[in-house]
Amino acid sequence: MEEMTLEMKVERNRLLREAVKQIASTKVAKRAAEIDAAGAFPWDMAELFAQQGFLSVMLPESYGGMDGDITAFCIIAEEIAYACGSSSLMVLAHCVGLMPLMIAGNEEQKKRFYERVAKDHVVAAFALTEPEAGSDAATLNTTAVLQGDHYLLNGRKCFVTNGGAAELYAVFVTTKPGERTKGISVFMVEKETTGLTIGKREEKLGMRGSDTTDLIFENAVVPKENLLGAEGSGWENAMTTLNLSRPAIGAQAVGIAQGAFDFALDYTSNRVQFGQKLADFQGVQFMLADMATKIEAARALVYKAATLLDQKVYERDRMSAIGVDKLSAMAKCFASDMAMQVTIDAVQLLGGYGYLKDYPVERMMRDAKVTQIFEGSNQIQRVVIARNLLKKILEKDFT
């Protein structure tokens, strides 16, 4: 197949945005409040997105995918999040669950698992966090021991998005306990695996339609053919996955913020107080101006990071060389902080009505909060950014 030119990619992504926006406005938006109130995984949305190819956006065309890039991934995350944060998170977590396979899987593994996604519409998940290993992700206690033609996995994963709904999990474990990053490996684990139990479903402040559970491994039997890459290569895989996915978290945050802003803009343009519309007050105008500016700044940063990632620089050393890890962290950090502030301001602009569940901005505010926490908290993002900024200075000092 002829390689796609820049102009072709731009046009493809423009058409994709139009298609996702149309589906989000006509299908997803109508379900958003119900999904949040029910706090249940939206299987109808999962099937809709699968039929539209959104769950296969990163898969090659040869496996039934869209052969999309990170920019396409961000577009889908943003436009769905505009209507419903929970639905956006389902797609986002699914794609992140497939990234370790995309990065390190061999052709047999890709054929076996990609076809389940494209043909059977199964959902995937990413399992890194443990009860004792949150921001300190290298401190994994889940172990994998090779016994003949399979590994036995033992341990517990927590905060697994899509945990109960997924059929495929990218699971990070230690194959060399005590060696931290050098001992981490990653497996594709199937839901029907003997010894795997789905833990309780977490009740959350926001993203309530997202399925968040524990995964419990008790001598879980995983074929050695499910190991992605070599033993000990899991840490590099995890960090590469996070670099690739963080702009999409930023895009999700931008979508949530844009949805809240547009609602607040419409409300203040129609709500009359003291004989004039709220939007006629200069104080309100300044708030709206600041909100819009922050959203545009975040969107620009998100898609700059996505554009660099689309150069297919998945190797950690190459990503660091051009500063993609820094920009990826900046995009996630800035956009999620922005979304939290913009949604809070949207609630404020609606006054007492903003605090009611009859209006969507309170849901958007609750959904925005977790974007500051998952995929690495924003405190961790600042550590990544600072280390990148100081790296050359520190290297110079020691040469």
Image (spheres, rainbow, N blue to C red):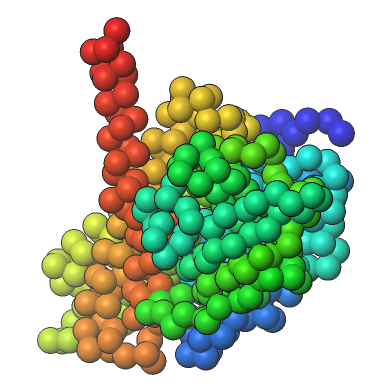
Q: Nearer the viewer, residue 208 or 48?
A: 208
- Left or right of 290? Residue 367 is right
Of the 4 image quadrants, the one containing the C terminus is top left
Q: Is residue 5 above or below residue 330?
A: above
- Left or right of 389? Residue 60 is right
Q: Position of residue 220 (x, y in %)?
A: 68, 65
- Left or right of 77? Residue 275 is left
Work out which residue is located at the far front of the displayed protein and give it.
147
Which residue is depicted at the point 61% across and 56% down?
A: 171
Is residue 328 visible from the viewing direction of this image? yes
Q: Is residue 331 above or below residue 56?
A: above
Among the 4 quarters of the image, the one containing residue 27: bottom right
Q: Position of residue 337 (x, y in %)?
A: 30, 57
Among the 4 quarters of the image, the one containing residue 122: bottom right
- Left or right of 108? Residue 261 is left
Is residue 272 visible from the viewing direction of this image? no
Which residue is depicted at the point 12% across and 86% down?
A: 274
Q: Position of residue 165 (x, y in %)?
A: 65, 75
Q: Position of residue 348 (x, y in %)?
A: 22, 77
Q: Nearer the viewer, residue 9 or 322?
A: 322
Q: How many marks?
A: 0
Of the 4 image quadrants, the one containing the N terminus is top right
Which residue is depicted at the point 58% across and 30% down?
A: 315
Q: Is residue 126 above or below residue 261?
A: above
Which residue is depicted at the point 64% across and 59% down?
A: 153
Q: Nearer the viewer, residue 139 or 317?
A: 139
